[in-house]
Image: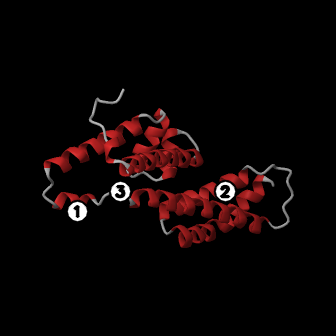
Amino acid sequence: MSFSLIEELHRKEEGRLRRFFMRRLRNDADAQDATQETFARLLGVAPKTQIENPQAYLFQIAKTVAARNITLTQAERSVFETVPDIENIAEDQPTPDRIVTARQYLTIMARAIEGLPSRCQEVFILSRLHGLPNGEIARQLGISRNMVEKHIMRALITCRDVRARLNGDPSTISTPGAEK
């Protein structure tokens, strides 16, 4: 597929492609990222590859990108749906035991995140604490959006696993500094 054909597709189909992603992802930043990723994947096609219907091929790539983004979003949401509702906890008058348990929980989660590779930590913090979209994180760190998503998924899976261990047996919550 020639670069000029890709430029032409970009010029003619970018708006339509972005609307396609907006309907599916319902977030402008994600739609922009997905549009860019789609064209980046199209650029990865060998220049000598002959494609009979480039527009259909472009939208087939877009469907794959949208499906992956939706799957990742659902996975992220499912991990955080089990996190306690902080607002309701703050409204209660917590008991001293509950305060200690919450602090221990946060310490254990922080340690789990600290145990991740440094790039994975950095991506997770930029995403979850600073609220940056994946495309912006990729740009800032000079890595692909796909790599950003892999780092986020690794961190989320780690958090989910820690939470499952903690919820499965309250005795697994250790005091800070007690782990070796």
User: Closer to the camera: disc 1 or disc 2?
Assistant: 1
Q: Earlier in the sequence, mark 1 or mark 2?
A: 2
Give the CA distance from mark 1 to mark 2: 44 Å
Which residue carries the number 2 mark? 39
Q: Residue at x 22, y 62 (%)?
A: 88
Left or right: 22 as drawn, with respect to 49: left
Which residue carries the number 1 mark? 88
Q: Residue at x 18, y 47 (%)?
A: 97
Q: Nearer the viewer, residue 64 or 3?
A: 64
Q: Nearer the viewer, residue 146 or 40?
A: 146
Q: Nearer the viewer, residue 141 or 82?
A: 82
Q: Residue at x 54, y 39 (%)?
A: 142
Q: Earlier in the sequence, mark 1 or mark 3?
A: 3
Q: Residue at x 27, y 33 (%)?
A: 176
Vertical comparison of 35 with 15: above or below: above
Q: Secondary structure at mark 3?
A: loop
Q: Secondary structure at mark 2?
A: helix
Percent of width and height locating residue 109: 36, 42
Vertical comparison of 73 with 150: above or below: below
Q: Residues within 10 Å of mark 1 (few under 14, many from 20)?
A: few
Which residue carries the number 3 mark? 83
Name which residue type carries label 1: Asn
Percent of width and height locating residue 177: 28, 29
Name which residue type carries label 2: Phe
Percent of width and height locating residue 26: 49, 69
Q: Nearer the viewer, residue 112 or 137?
A: 112
Give the CA distance from mark 2 to mark 3: 36 Å
Q: Residues within 10 Å of mark 2 (few under 14, many from 20)?
A: some
